[in-house]
Image (spheres, helix red, strand yellow):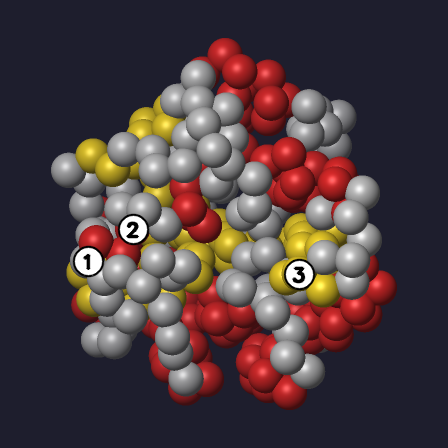
Amino acid sequence: MRRMPAVAGQFYHGTATKLNQQVEQYIDKDLIKEHAIGILSPHAGLVYSGSVAGAVYSTIEFPRTFLLIGPNHTGLGARISLMASGEWEIPTGVFAIDEKLAHRIATNVPIVSRDTHAHMFEHSLEVQLPFIAYFSTEPKIVPITIMSASIEECRLLGEGIAKSIREVNYPVVIVASSDMSHYVPDDVARQKDRMAIDRVTAFDAEGLYEIVGKESISMCGYLPAVVMLFATKALGAVEARLVKYSTSAEVSGDYDHVVGYAGMIIK
């Protein structure tokens, strides 16, 4: 089946020409491309988070497959949902699902459900695709959403993903899709988001899981980020760094109710 865009014309421009122009303003064509095992990228409307997402995608070498892990905002479908076959379409491209890698993940991780319903209206993974399509429509994707998960389930999923990537034996970049703090003052967002960012740079998956709860950090994709940390660590990653951070206040001018955005690379 082909998944049609759910948020075209809302989170990003709905025509190919306008979307390409929109993405281009957030891209740095002069950056040296780095080999990445994973990235953290935001998923808000491009007008707010596009500069952060664009900075991250401008930094990395493109793989054969992007494994996209995002939060489930809609409440539809399975708790941990893998769309294992088909295609995803946006105005600037069509992406085939990497059925080989998807099958390996479904086999290696019993807590994952093959499910399409969770993905039909979920924006967190779709909003990554305009940036991928800007550079190339050749990479395949594997979409996974997470509604809830214990720390042990995050570990099982992350290590199962790493095992599956080793088994297919071709380049894969794991994308954890997440915005940071939601609807708090700008200074509070920056303070709390720094706590979460520091756990990522320390490769401390358990610490990230714990501090989000302890400090009430409204990071919507912390579970995908935790899974990505377990997976990249198992794949031999040794460095995680912040590429760019911003808040919505830089666009809206509202410093009382902001959303934070962090772009990170893991290599």
* Image position of 52 with respect to 13: above or below: below
Tag 3 secondary structure: strand
- Distance from Cα at disc 2 to Cα at disc 3: 25 Å
Q: Residues within 10 Å of mark 3 (few under 14, many from 20)?
A: some
Which residue is at a point 72% across and 28% down the rendered structure image?
Answer: 28
Disc ID at residue 183: 3
Mark 3 is on which residue type?
Tyr
Q: Residues within 10 Å of mark 2 (few under 14, many from 20)?
A: many
- Distance from Cα at disc 2 to Cα at disc 1: 8 Å
Query: Foreground residue, 117 or 87?
Result: 117
Residues at marks 2 and 1 touching, judged by CB atoms closer than 8 Å: yes
* Image position of 203 with respect to 126: above or below: below
Taking the image as shown, residue 228 lies to the left or right of residue 112, namely right
Which x, y percent locates residue 137?
41, 27
Q: Quadrant of residue 29?
A: top right
Q: Which residue is mark 1?
A: 115
Q: Quadrant of residue 208?
A: bottom right
Tag 1 secondary structure: loop
Which x, y percent locates residue 153?
37, 81
Mark 2 is on which residue type?
His
Mark 1 is on which residue type?
Asp
* Image position of 65 with respect to 84: above or below: above
Disc ID at residue 224: none
Query: Foreground residue, 252 or 12?
Result: 252
Mark 2 or 3: in front is 3
Q: Which residue is mark 2?
A: 119
